[in-house]
Amino acid sequence: MTQERDTLETDVLIVGGGPAGLAAAIRLKDLLSERAKRPGVKALEPSIMVIEKAAEFGAHSISGAVLDPSSLRELIPDFEASAPLGAKVSRDSVEYLFAESKFTLPITPPPLRNHGNYVISLSHLVKWLAGEAEKRGVDCMSGFPAASLLYDGDRVVGVRTGDKGIDKHGNQKGNYEAGVDIRAKVTILAEGARGSLTKTAVAKLKLDAGKFPMVYTLGIKELWEVPKGRLGKGEVIHTMGEPLGWETFGGGFIYGLSETQISIGLVVGLDYRDPFLDPHGLFQKMKTHPRVAELLSGGKMAKYGARAISEGGWYCIPRTYADGLLLIGEAAGFLNAMRLKGIHLGIKTGMLAAETVIEALEKDDSSAAVLKGFEERVNHSSVKEELYAVRNFHQGFKHGFLGGIINTGLLMATGGRGLIDPLTPSGGYADMEKLIDRYGAGTTRDFFERSRADGKLTFDRLTDVFHAGAIHEEDQPAHLHVADPNICETTCRTEYGNPCEKFCPAAVYEMVPKNDGNPKSLKLQINFSNCVHCKSCDIMDPYQIITWVTPEGGGGPKYDGL
């Protein structure tokens, strides 16, 4: 029996209410207004809709975050009058952390200089952008997760939103509402890193043909309230070294959001080799370093969050257009890993997408032949200029920190080329070593020990999840699909020691006793209500049997202030 569903029609549908998606909507409305003022121009009044899975705009938005305002200034020239800008960067430094000491680089490398930039809360900025879009007449709808794309052959014709009111057994509850089919002339995916619809579209339409696979990192962050004077307002510190050592890509950040608020976090490459590597544990260890502990002493952790970051760079960006479809922002991989920035690129690509959509609406043609204009606009913009110059950055760390630093210097000297161009990236989960190869025969999952949290400076995963505000209705289907749990209980346990327990920063995956009389028998338990939507499981599962899909609308973290 076919499920009857309501259908909504719109001209332009934007999936994802982050900086890229909202910038596209704002720019499109502004271009339409400018167009209407030109004499003799045929009227064009398309409907524009932005849908967001979070309960409110900004609730799932998280970044370090230091904002390069160049694109925002182009989008909204007077943004400084009303945008929630935390603090203008007052000082930059880069520190190398040894076991018990630090060394401050005498000169901050050019990519990490932040003169004229702002330390912000991304969630607050996104909420403000949504307000700006609504002022212009954009339909902004939160709590609407896009569950799947709608196709007519290979043409994308919209999305289907997720059903509401389904219990964990798949039965309809009293509050059941069927998802809605939203049909559009142009669908723009602005889901952020590892978007579920973007993932399926890239696979179905072969948008990654001839491209390197995307490389990701995991960013983990806490917001701290500290005594006044610990860190200057607008002060920006980036760290290298401890707790990552020489093998693992990544680094730390410490930002002065205000005189009493510090954003602190750790970015860890999701192309590591050690199956026992624990990004959350490493972040907690980072806070025990004397340099960091001194800053946080006497303070209180207020917020927590985590998310995947698309860091593959220019050669990993898939084809960004198809019939009826555009990919923008970090969903496509527009992020400068060397500068640790992507918000301005998301905004800029959203603006370029709007220019392309105007052309498609004028021609009444949303075919790939017309939407290809987006790629052409990107190639003639500051986006390509910036990303092409760092096109081999992350890949240079494939064989360790020292090689990466040398490669970075070569990139800066050669305009992004380095010694080898293109430099092949690591394979992410494919590079994870098996226990026997890493630690020798006889190693078991018991080798791994979780770090002990003191509840003041360091915290366990569940405490951090609480501070993420993560909420999912318990009586709903799990949005984390494991194709074959038996692999977790047998093969993965012996080959990798169940790395999902380590790479998940929210204690979603847990191997628990089977209670079958054998004390060594374990089964997989999925605590999906803990999920903070970081997507690390979808990325790093060594067997690629975990699939992240959108949960019921409104669920997930609440990153107010992050």
Image: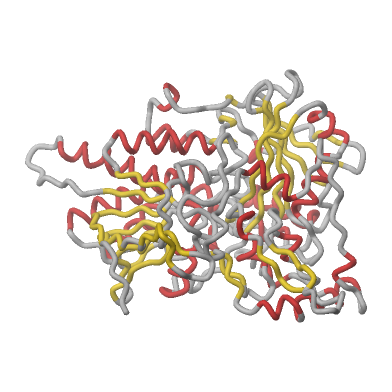
The answer to whether residue 166 is above or below residue 106 is below
Which residue is most to the top? Answer: 228
Which residue is painted at 66% across and 54% down in the image? 218
Residue 54 seen in this snapshot: yes
User: From the image, which quarter does the N terminus lie in?
Assistant: bottom left
Residue 269 seen in this snapshot: no
The answer to whether residue 508 is above or below residue 88 is below
Q: Horizontal and vertical percent for residue 447? A: 90, 66
Residue 180 quadrant = bottom left
The answer to whether residue 320 is above or below residue 337 is below
Which residue is painted at 21% across and 37% down in the image? 33
Residue 23 quadrant = top left
Foreground residue, 455 or 178? 178
Foreground residue, 250 or 163? 163
Foreground residue, 302 or 417? 302
Foreground residue, 36 or 122? 122
Q: Going by the image, does 561 lie left or right of 254?
A: left
Q: Horizontal and vertical percent for residue 130? A: 39, 38
Which residue is most to the front? Answer: 174
Which residue is painted at 72% across and 49% down in the image? 462
